Amino acid sequence: QVQLVESGGGLVQAGGSVRRSCVASGRIYSLNVFLWYRQTPGKLRELVALIPSFGSTNYTDYVKGRFTISRDDAKNAVYLQMDSLKPEDTAVYYCQYTGYSEGITYQYWGQGTQVTVSS
């Protein structure tokens, strides 16, 4: 089992910045991916960014150039630096940890935190 604890978020004005953090504990897989998703009411959860242990980062188009995902493997942590925020970035942001072992994929979710961007 993997436990994810998220922090950061809250209310910010348009154009401002927020830094989200997510720390994993428990069983840590050598092959893994940290992902950030977001969800607004009535919509499906959508991928924002991902950073694997074995490759490069990837961002969805609407956050490219504004958001930066990074990881600290010594702390089993992932971060999402969110800059130049827009009201449409308002959502609940979730951390996900995906681990791979012996052909099996394991997925774990954080509790999610609201980020509200005021205009």
Image (cartoon, rainbow, N blue to C red):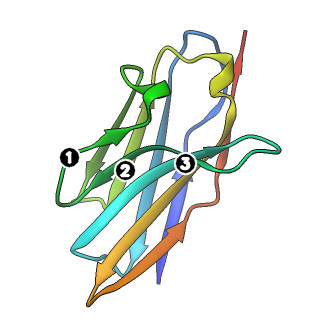
Looking at the image, residue 44 lies above or below residue 65: below
What number is the disc on residue 56?
1
Residue sticking out furthest to the left: 54
For label 3, the crowd category at 10 Å Cα-Cα, with few meaning under 14, some 14 to 19 and many 20 or more, is some
Number of numbered discs present?
3
Residue picked out by circle 3:
37
Q: Which of marks 3 and 2 is nearer the N terminus?
A: 3
Identity of the residue drawn at 64% across and 52% down:
112
Secondary structure of the residue carrying tag 1 is loop
The quadrant the C terminus occupies is top right
Q: In this view, does 16 lie to the left or right of 119?
A: left
Looking at the image, residue 5 lies above or below residue 26: above
Secondary structure of the residue carrying tag 3 is strand
* In front of the other: 38 or 83: 38
Residue picked out by circle 2:
78
Do the numbered discs 2 and 1 sit on residues whose CB atoms are within 8 Å?
Answer: no
Residue 62: give x, y in percent of width and height.
49, 26
- Disc 2 from disc 1: Cα separation: 14 Å
Residue 39: give x, y in percent of width and height.
68, 45
Residue 47: give x, y in percent of width and height.
51, 46
**Type of the residue with mark 3:** Tyr
For label 1, the crowd category at 10 Å Cα-Cα, with few meaning under 14, some 14 to 19 and many 20 or more, is few
Secondary structure of the residue carrying tag 2 is strand
- Disc 3 from disc 2: Cα separation: 13 Å
- Disc 3 from disc 1: Cα separation: 17 Å
Identity of the residue drawn at 69% across and 36% down:
91
Do the numbered discs 3 and 1 sit on residues whose CB atoms are within 8 Å?
Answer: no
Identity of the residue drawn at 68% across and 18% down:
87
What number is the disc on residue 38?
none
**Type of the residue with mark 1:** Ser
**Type of the residue with mark 2:** Val
